[in-house]
Amino acid sequence: MITSDQLTQDILIAPMIILTSLLGGVSQSKGDLLMLLGGAVLFIFILTYVYIKGEIKLPFEASIRNDSELQVFVALLFCFGGALVFSLLGLSAALGAFIGGIVMHAGKATEWIHDTLNSFRILFISVFFFSIGLQMDLIFLQQNIVPILVALLAVYLTNHFLNTVILRIFSCTWKEAIIGGALLAQIGELSFLLASLAYSLNIIEEYAYLFTISLVSITLIISPFWIAMTEGFIHRSLGSFSDRKKIEK
């Protein structure tokens, strides 16, 4: 099941890509614009449908369920088929492949392929962070360490505060809200896609691109420590409060 914060982030990426393309001065005919909007609507519809239903009935489900080889071919079909369809609609092929993976996961007849790929999860995560490391310019980071650290602090404090308030409004306890704010304080991974697109369209210059990549990368590195620090602070504060209550009694 997709969590609500993941769903919101994934839904917003499609219109953000369209808006970024328009800001880049890419000339779009009415037909191209309609295809972009159609792709965005399709993207949002599939994600919302999967989130609400939780399960999708795939064609020939009975045959696929007990045949591992067919599941592999179906997975490849959804992956490359989704990439092709969304590319033709003017969106990113990566988004199409992502949608294909979502549909495969929601189809319970393909649990074998999901369980098999699950063992490669650590490898995929390692490759992802390796690719992030390759994009970081250490010389740029050293030369601009002060503004990056200031922006980093502003990002964490702002995101943590806003997410804490929003979670508290939606009936979470203060403890849950503060810890939830820490979990959501980092900048999302999809920022890399937007930054790369904006840079390729000359919306941002190389300095802004390198600054964004460095900032997002550091937030991903620091996030576990920020969460641990927040949890430790919460537990110490609650412990001190409980001790005071016992003494007063």
Image: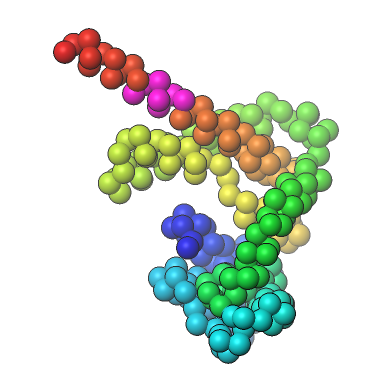
Residue lying at 70% horizontally and 60% vertically, measured from the top left: 197
* Left or right: 86 as drawn, with respect to 13: right
Q: Quadrant of residue 154?
A: top right
- Residue 84 visible somewhere in the drawing: no
Screen quadrant of the C terminus: top left
**In the drawing, does residue 141 fall left or right of residue 191?**
right
Q: Residue 96 lies in magenta, yes or no?
A: no
Which SS does the magenta portion mostly show? helix
On the image, the x and y values in percent for residue 101 come to: 62, 70
Asked which quadrant contains residue 92, the reply is bottom right
Q: Quick check: 204 above or below 107?
A: above
Question: Residue drawn at (83%, 33%), measured in percent from left and top?
Answer: 139
Q: Residue furthest left?
A: 249
Query: 22 or 40, which is in the foreground?
Result: 40
Q: Work out whether 174 lies above or below 94.
A: above
Question: Is residue 245 in view from this perspective?
Answer: yes
Outermost residue toward the top in this view: 247
Most distant residue in the bottom direction:
60
Q: Name the residue located 47 percent from the left edge and 74 percent from the top edge.
A: 55
The way the protein has been coloured in the rendering is: rainbow
Provide residue 100's location: percent of width, then percent of height.
62, 74
Q: Residue 196, image x and y in percent?
A: 72, 56
Q: Is residue 166 left or right of residue 112?
A: left
* Of 42 and 100, the residue lying toward us: 100
Residue located 43% across and 37% down the image: 179
Q: Which residues are magenta?
A: 232-238
**Residue 161 locus on image (x, y percent):** 42, 36
